[in-house]
């Protein structure tokens, strides 16, 4: 069994910062790509940022230059540092990871439960 648990969401004023964390726990052999998604009310879920096991990163245009994704492979944790937050960043943020539980096994897709980020103007 594998679980992803996000933390760090909350209410912040525009221009402020938040740092989200997502820790994977359970029987884990290796983790490939880890991603952050967000979904605002009435909108589709969008990819925000991703990072590979080797440390490569990618960002959506809407957050490039403001958000930074990072990971601690020893802790099976991915972070999202969000700076210069805007009201349009308000959404439920969820982490996603491709995890292999066993040597010689296959990677499966796992999701966290999500954490609310609200940016007031």
Image (spheres, grey):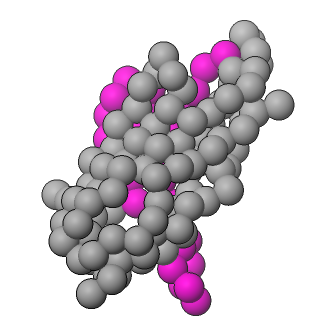
Residue, far top: 103
- Name which quarter of the figure residue 14 lies in: bottom left
* Residue 22, horizontal then vertical, whole percent: 53, 42
Q: Is residue 72 left or right of residue 96?
A: left
Q: Quadrant of the N terminus?
A: top right
Q: Residue at x 31, y 50 (%)?
A: 81
Considering the image in quadrants, where does the C terminus appear? bottom left
Name the magenta segment's main secondary structure. Answer: strand
Query: Is 48 in the magenta?
Result: yes
Looking at the image, which residue is at 61% across and 20% down?
A: 30
In the figure, is residue 107 to the left or right of 36?
A: right
Q: Within the magenta stretch, is there residue 72? A: no
Front-lying residue, 113 or 103: 113
x and y percent of residue 50 in the render? Answer: 41, 46
Front-lying residue, 41 or 7: 7
Which residue appears at 62% of the width and 33% of the height?
A: 24
- The residue located at (69%, 44%) in the rendering is 110
Q: How many marks?
A: 0
* Residue 57 falls in image quadrant: top left
Picture layout, residue 85 above or below residue 58? below
> What segment carries the magenta color?
29-58
**On the picture, is 117 further left or further right than 112?**
left
Name the image quarter holding residue 104: top right
Report whether residue 39 is seen.
yes
Q: Is residue 47 visible?
A: no
Vertical arrangement, residue 52 with respect to residue 5, above or below: above
Q: Is residue 15 above or below residue 70?
A: below
């Amino acid at each position: 069994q594998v679980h992803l648990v996000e933390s760090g969401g909350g209410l912040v004023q525009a221009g402020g910062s938040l740092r989200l964390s997502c820790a994977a726990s359970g029987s884990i052999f290796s983790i490939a790509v880890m991603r952050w998604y967000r979904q605002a009310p009435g909108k589709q879920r969008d990819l925000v940022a991703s990072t590979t096991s080797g440390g490569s990163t990618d960002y959506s245009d809407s957050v490039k230059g403001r958000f930074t994704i990072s990971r601690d492979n020893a802790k099976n944790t991915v972070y999202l540092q969000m700076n210069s937050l805007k009201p349009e960043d308000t959404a439920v943020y969820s982490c996603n990871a491709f995890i292999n539980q066993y040597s010689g096994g296959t990677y499966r897709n796992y999701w966290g439960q999500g954490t609310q980020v609200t940016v007031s103007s």
